[in-house]
Structure formats: C-alpha cells, structure tokens
Image: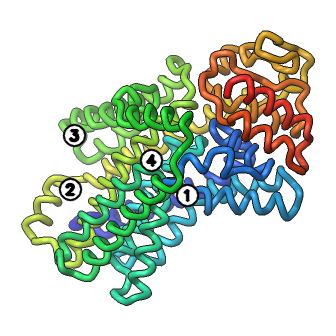
Amino acid sequence: MFGRAPRLDDRSFRLLIVGTGLCWSIAFPVIALFYQLELYGDGAMFSYAVAVRDVWAFHWHNISGRTSVFLLTLLPAEALVRITNSPSAGIIAYGVLFYISPLMGLAVTYVADRSPGRIIFVYACGSTALLCPLIFGFPTEMWLAHAMFWPTLALSHYAKTTHTGALLVLTAWLLLAFTHEAALVLLLAIAVTLAPRGVWSATFVRATISLLIVAILAAAAKIILPPDDYYAGAFLRAALGFFDLEIFRVEVVLVLLGAIIAYGAILMLLSIWLPRWACIWALVISLGLLFTHWLYLDHSVHASSRYYLRTALVVVTPLLGALAALAALTREGIVPNRLARLRQTLILPRGRTLCALASIFLVVTLIHAMETGKFVASWVDYRDAIAMLAMSNNSDPALGDPRFVSAERISPALAPLSWFSTIPYLSIILSNFSPNRLIIDPAGNYFWLSCGTATRNKDAQLVVPVQTRELVRVYSCLHR
C-alpha cells in the first residue's frame, strides 16, 4: 500500500481495507433499519420531531452550524410525512438517509479521487472501518462530517481548476462545514494538505477562498439564528467537554489499545524464534486472548459512550486524511524524495510489516463487530422493555402526572442503554404513537421542548394523536 512491499501483498492489503470499509458501510444502514437504531439516543427525539413535522422548531434552529444534517436527512424525511401522512415512513426515511451516508461518501470519493491508485479512496475505506463503528448507532452529526470529509478531500485535490470545479469544491466545503462546528478542524486539515502543491496554486487558492466564505457564513448563521437561552448554556457545557480526555476512558477504547499493544508485544517476542510465521501466530494468540476476555471477563456494553467518542473522529480523521494526501503527493512526485524515504522508514521499516498491519486491522475489525453485536442485542432488550412499560398501567404521579411512569422500573441491567432526555419520545414511537404511559427518567435534567413550542405543536393538525402530543405538552410545560 505504501511502496516497496511485494505486489501481491500490497494488492491484498488494499483489497482487505477497501472490502472491509465497503462491508461496514453497507452493514450500517441494514443493521440500523432492522433494529430501529434511528431511535437510539437523541434519535428518538429527532424521529418524533419528524413524525410531528416540526424538526426545525423542536431543535434545529438552535444548531444552525449543523444545517447540512437537517437539509440532507431530516427535512426530506419530514417532507415525506407531509406527503404520505405516515409518521413511520418519515422515521424510516430519516434512518435510511442518515445511516447510508458513509456508503454515499465512499461512492463520491471513488468518483472524485484521481490520485495514483485511488489512494484517498483506500484511506477513506480504512477510516470508515476503523472509526465509524465507534459511534455507529448514536445519531451524532459527526457521522455525516466523517462521510463528507473524504469526498471533500478528494475534490479539493483533484477537481478541475475550472469554474465548475471551484463550485464543486465550495459546495463540498459548505456541506462539510455545516455538519458540525468541529468540522472546522477537518477543513483546516484539508487546507494544510494542499499547501505542498504551492500556496499560489489554483487548488490552494480556491481552498483558501472557500475557507473564507465558510467562516463568514458560519459567523452569520450564529448571529442571524442564535440558539435559545436554554440551549445556549447546554451547548457551551458540551463544547467545553468535547475534548475531555475522560471521554476515552471507556471499555471499548481500553480493549482496542490493549489488543494492539498485546499484538505488538507478542509479535516482537515471536519474531525472535519464528520470524517467518511470527505475524500469523501473533494474530492467532491475540484472537485467543480476545475471546477469553469476552467469554470470562467482559460485562460491558458500548452504548451511551458512542456519543462521546465522536471526539475520536475529530482527532483521528484529519490525521488519516493527512496520511492519505501525503501518500498521493508522494506518488505524484510533489513531496520531496527525502520526505518519502522518511515516511517509508517510519511506516514500512522492513520485513512483513504489511502482514502485521493487516493483522492489527483484522483485530480491530473483530472488536468492532463484537461490540456492535453486544450493543444491538442489548438495544433490542431495552427497546422491548420500553415498549412494554409504555403500554402498561403502571403509574408514578410524583413525576407530575398520573399518565407518567418512571424509567427506573426498567431493569438496572439495561441502564447503559438509557439516554434520559429522549426516553419520553422513544416510549411514544415504540407504542405506535399511542402510549398508555409516558416514560420519564426522574434524574433527567435536560428538556428539549419549551412549553410554547410543545403547545403550538399540540394544537396543530397532525396524524400523530392529539392525546399523545398533549402528554408531551404537559411534560414540557412542567419543566420549561
């Protein structure tokens, strides 16, 4: 993949990366739709907003910096509800549009990539396989930011230096910029990768102009569409904690780091006695250790932590993008030979490094697959428990209304799946919009809707039963 490895090994490694990335990107929408993962976490509130045709008023007016996600996933889904009068159809459409974005991103990257060997596309597939499973299932806007980063990188380097090419680049930059505020980091990384082409080159100049336009429009959006006072405080707290290192102190990260370090240590030891087969035996032993861990030691579920690990995408994605651009520039002869030699020395020293990298890639993929399976199985149990409680006659009037019931009645074993602020909306959707009880988390301290917004929505002419929207109004007015 990086140069002087045997041709067969290099091709096999590329096929492994591309095949794994494509398989994950196809699996994401299939798994998500089959298990209703569009309803997990914040997705429950977003889906309810689609169902009652009020996405912008419910939340998106607070996050004008993420308008791309609204335009590409939620607005079309809401429009489908208006056309069909089917809330469920709109929710499914939202799930399709959101979770298919990695596959669409890879497709556009493949078309736009003109680098030697389509090296940017290869890295895009690798990034999809390595990073996206960490957050899969939670509808963070960084999901779309990652999907858009790679085609934007390819277009920035290889779009024709014409007016049409400049328009394509600007469009890509705007779409990426308005996925999430942290996308600015991704755009800056793309601009840096263009610098070796020359600060007066057409590619770098148009990127600079695009970045300037993005900055002006992002600032204007914040001024013209400021968030509500209630949300502004929550947004500030979330922003301050975005790069908190505590985010990475979760089981899945520890397992990933432990597996990689263990593989490296085993490989070094075996290389002394079995240099020819050390890579394969190290992989076999590492897999054995992993399965032992899962069978006897592991009791974790990577669920709510999926939201917080969006930070990993902001940190690692631009690094992978820089490596991809460096590889492309080296093959084009733009990067000086001494830098190319240094890169080969650091990444491909000698021996069977491709085998070792492929083994680590397989280990990480297996961990992601196992964690995804555990998460989905637990989500199904949690989803069923919520549906059953919402249709029960249990009641906890102390929560503010006899029609409310506490989420604490659900088994504590399912607590890792809970996302307190959206449980009421999840209970509504899972009961086919006609719950006997609205499920409330007593510990909840964030409330999406103001009393005025919930009241206006309750008085609208909608397919969702007015009794259900009245429950949401009562709940909202108790707190905002």
Q: How many marks?
A: 4
Marks 3 and 4, how far apart at CA: 30 Å
Q: Mark 2: which amino acid?
A: Leu
Q: Earlier in the sequence, mark 1 or mark 4?
A: 1
Do labels 3 and 1 touch, CB within 8 Å?
A: no
Q: Residue at x 40, y 32 (%)?
A: 241
409 vs 336, nearest the viewer:
409
Q: Which image quadrant for residue 448?
A: top right
Q: Mark 4: which amino acid?
A: Leu
Q: Mark 3: which amino acid?
A: Ser
**Which is more foreground, mark 3 or mark 1?**
1
Q: Which mark is residue 271?
A: 3
Q: Earlier in the sequence, mark 3 or mark 2?
A: 3
The image position of residue 301, as x and y in percent, is 57, 27
**Which is more foreground, mark 2 or mark 4?**
4
Q: Mark 1: which amino acid?
A: Thr
Do labels 2 and 4 touch, CB within 8 Å?
A: no
Q: Tell me the residue that label 4 is attached to.
A: 131
Q: Tell me the residue that label 2 is attached to.
A: 348
Marks 1 and 2, how far apart at CA: 42 Å
Mark 1: few/some/many CA within 10 Å (<14, 14-19, 20+): many
Give the secondary structure at mark 2: loop
**Which is more foreground, mark 1 or mark 2?**
1
